[in-house]
Image: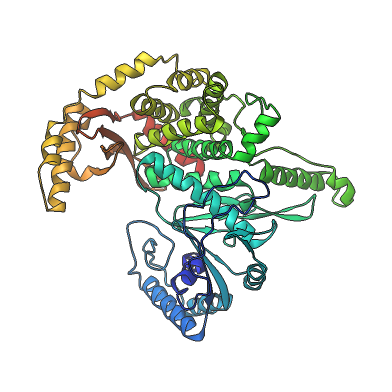
Amino acid sequence: MFDLSKLVNLNYLMLKYSQNKKELNNVIINYHPQNIDNYYQDVLPTKLTIAEFILNDEIKKNIENDLKNIFDKIKSNLFQTKKQVANLENIDIKKKKKYIPQDKIDDLLKQIMKSIPEKAFIIKTDNISMVLTQYYKIKQELGDLNNIDNKLVFKPKTIMYDVLSTVYNIEKDINKANNYAQEKFIKPFKVDLYGQSNRDFLKNAYYDPISNKLVLGSVFNLSTQEVINASNDTDVVIHELGHKLLDNLRPGYIDNRFHFESGAVHEAFGDIMAFLSAASDPNIQKYIQDNKIDLTKTNILSQIAEYFGKTIYTNIKQTKELLNNNPYMLPDELSKIKDERPVRDISESFEYKKYSDLKKEEKEVHLQSKSLSNAFYKAFINFYNDNKDKYSLNEVVDRFYNIFIKGTKISNPATTTIPEFMKSIIIADILFNNSQLTSYLVKSANENKIFQNLNINDILNEINNSRNLKVGDLYSILNKQNNDANKFKEELKEAILKILKNYSLDFDYLSIDDISVSIVPGFNGGINIELTYRYPKSIKLKSKDYPVYGGGIFVFDNKMNLIYSYIEKINEQKVKDMQDYANIIYK
């Protein structure tokens, strides 16, 4: 039986009906809530609104009617859309032949209406929204607000402190990423600040692409008897934000969920985002400088989520001790059992292996992500150490962050492997950064076996050869005026299909319905054309076929010169690997 409760997003409901009454409009935050010293002087690059939400009888009735309409559609099996989105305006459920009893629907409706609070606060910025139901606590905190010279100051361990520190970190990195990508590519999303929708201890923080939400949960620290919020660990916040950013740039990496290395790249992307964000923090920069920290060894930058990690791992260790040794262990003895380590440490070298060379126990995306994140980290540190007389740590962050985002924008839009993704970053450095970082990236990638003794000339030859792709038909379509969007799209797809068939006989099977094409902003006034195509073979799982997709990218400068192209070739091993991984995760 389908679980109807999974379709109900109370945060969405309250956001939808939050226009009833607002006490605090257009509150501008221009002060970091953690500003206990002189190093945070950044202006939060967004407008933040704190709005009181009053759920009166009229709104309750509207919500109830909305829910009845939705449940009626579900019951009559008339509700289908292309993509699964967990809100009330666009819900995807597979067609169900089983009858859903009316009494079950009525009971669920009563439970939902009973669970909706009468008062809450809505927090909104340019990019994120969240609902906080701790109404009276927040009301008191807002009443006690210390507002000096238009600087909002909240004390640690308060709800609004958590809100503003989370908002600050998210908005700061979103604006950086948009700047490097040269487009506002990030779609607005929701944040579940205290993991209200999270019931799984081992999934205490995650990005949910279905409901378009970051869930930042809470864990009870057995040693200190405190509740630890993921929102207080900037690494966790930025790592999960990294999943959101990459999903907006490359949705295929999550959509093609049986492609193992796309998942590993997702995890590395989050860790790289986290360490770059930490390295740009003025407090951390001063700490590194004052204490002469050796960044080649484990350190404050390389340790990802050390605050949250030590709570999780200590809890796991203590729980094992209680279960295996003495379930009546005294609190003093229990508190001595600690495992103080971060979730991951990307200063530790890790060698890449192809999926087909991995043992079954090694097929875990977080584990295999470390070859990419460590290679990127080593290149960063080596460049910084060699150039610290010339560049500050913040300037090095700017250079690496820049080519990291640009490399993502020219990566394969369908799926990716760790070598493919690393090469995209290197190519971005060559195309848009005068190869300043290339030797460091190539060296660290070779050390981690991501490449087999690749040299820079190999990559330069690959770029030059890619410019020889015959794209004349594209030029004529892009340069002619066409007011009919549908006709333009069809002509563009026909031109891409012709390019693919001329590129390789392997693409003779393709029809125009097997490909999708999009034009997105490129760099410095240019454009990128992204394409995905359906493989001739699918994978099978529980008697159902799942398509396999490949991709390609054409990068044009502002004079419409092709400066780089990449087309994924049909790869039989890719299909075999995806079939194997699908069998593992759904066994």
Comparing 237 with 353, the one in front is: 237
Percent across and percent down for residue 303 are 64, 35
Q: Position of residue 26 (x, y in %)?
A: 48, 66
Q: Residue at position x 64%, y 40% from top? A: 283
Total marks placed: 0
Q: Seen in the image, is 151 located left or right of residue 90?
A: right
Q: Quadrant of residue 415?
A: top left
Residue 300 vs residue 534: left or right?
Answer: right
Q: Nearer the viewer, residue 438 or 394?
A: 394
Q: Residue at x 29, y 34 (%)?
A: 552
Q: Position of residue 370 (x, y in %)?
A: 55, 31
Q: Residue at point 70% right, 57% down? A: 157
Q: Is residue 159 left or right of residue 352?
A: right
Residue 167 in the image: above or below residue 434: below
The image shows residue 160, relative to residue 462, as above or below, that is: below
Name the foreground residue: 498 vs 158.
158
User: Where residue 101 appears, x then y in whole percent?
Assistant: 46, 76
Nearest the eye: 258 or 285: 285
Q: Is residue 101 visible?
A: yes
The answer to whether one can see residue 256 in this image is: no
Residue at the far front: name it: 149
Residue drawn at 42 percent across, 72 percent down? 99
- Residue 155 against residue 240 in the figure, above or below: below
568 left or right of 88 in image: left
Residue extending furthest bottom?
57
Instruction: Using the image, determine if residue 87 lies above or below residue 311.
Output: below
